[in-house]
Image: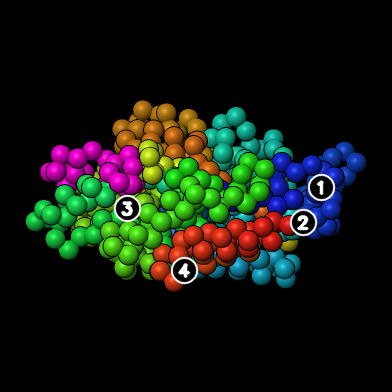
Amino acid sequence: MRHLLLRACVVSTAAAVLAACGSGGTQERTAGGNSTDSFKGRGPITLAGGKDNTGVLAKMLDKWNKSHRKEQVRFIELPDNADDQRQRMIQNAELKSGEFSVLSLDVVWTAEFAANRWVAELPKDRFEAGKYLGPTLEGASYLGRLYAAPWTSDGGLLYYRSDLLKQVGAQPPRTWAEMEQTCQKVLALPQGKGMSCYAGQFDKYEGLTVNFSEMIDGAGGSVVDKDGKPTVDSPEALKGLSFFTDAYKSGLIPKKAITFKEEEGRQAFQQSRLVFHRQWPYQWSLANAKDGSSKVAGKFGVAPLPGLNGPGVSSLGGHNLAVSRFAENKATALDFITFITSEQSQRENLLLSSNAPTIASLYDDSAMIEKYPYLPVLKSSILGAAPRPRVVRYGDATAAIQGAAYRALQGGTPPAAALKELQERLEKIAKP
């Protein structure tokens, strides 16, 4: 699931600067330039990742396991909260434990795990670079080297009640003001009774970093500039944050949304309690379920995120698969990653769960577009997405952002003060 601070050890940093980051910042290499990591050993492995909400991962593991009797993959389900997943993986790596063979990493964790030598560099010849969407491959790389395989991507989308917008003669909003105006009309309908206008992911976790970044970028601001300098204390950023703090204060955003992660918001939208919802692509299939779990099946559409004065900017999301440097049976782990990130596996993943693929051709496939008409919108969202910080001290950066955004939304800190404090925190974190 977009924009922050780039420390000295980032993708564009020169080798001389990298050396100053400490011995933990790179992997040792042979004279030929190859990583000293080798992919040897065959046998059972594990895959560590967040909860399989769609059930598709279990089907893919079954498919692999049926044809690899001596190389079974066992899924280790980590907490649903992304911050907790990251912490579990870090604890495991710091212990140099082989419990986790393959790691499902949020795209923004790649630099941190690579710089700390917690994951092995992957052989590029096993993954054809030209077939991936550019941002997804970049998010799996560090200092020009591949440390993970692009598995699923994500771009933020605006889910909207197409049936209710049709009743009031409205189109999907391009700006936040248009969204507010449309909500006023929809909520005045009999069908709008008990509904709220809008929600995203506003609980104090990684999703809030994503949503905050989209607030800032959508208003023409940035959390950092192209050189990695923190720029969050700006007039544009203030406009973006102020719109959402005011929206929460006025009730445009429901009070309960301060507790929403992805799943809480999804349930609210599916139970017809929201007119608009900022969410990832995976919601499409679940909200369209015909088993009675969704009250909005066939009654919603998907559009680009709105912004202050026009279309907004999504944060880049998604997950990559990496091999733990402490794992046994790395040869099996590499083969498994190649299997589950293949075009065929990504096609199945898209068809069964609406998870966004990383392979570009699937977005232009007429059969896929017929089933998922939002794919062109999603492709544009991903290609235009802004990255979250690929930094070694990412935990410090995202914690600072979450704290500032959460206090501002709750009304505990005025937006201007929150941005000023965040600017100061990020500048300290960014120092080499």
Numbered mark located on residue 277 in the image: 3
Q: Residues within 10 Å of mark 1 (few under 14, many from 20)?
A: few
Q: Position of residue 117 (x, y in %)?
A: 75, 56
Q: Badge 2 is on which residue? A: 432
Secondary structure under the numbered disc 3 in the rendered image? strand
Q: Residue at x 60, y 39 (%)?
A: 137
Among the two numbered marks 4 and 2 on one chain, the one whose residue lies closer to the N terminus:
4
Q: What type is the residue that disc 1 sits on? A: Val
Left or right side of 284 for 1? right
**Which amino acid type is shown beneath numbered disc 4?**
Thr
Instruction: Give the CA separation, mark 3 to mark 2.
Output: 39 Å
Where does the magenta region start and end?
158-178
> Element under label 1?
helix
The Cα–Cα distance between marks 3 and 1, rounded to whole angstroms, is 42 Å
Q: Which one is in front in this view, the residue at disc 1 or the one at disc 2?
A: 2
Question: In the drawing, what numbered circle is on residue 413?
Answer: 4
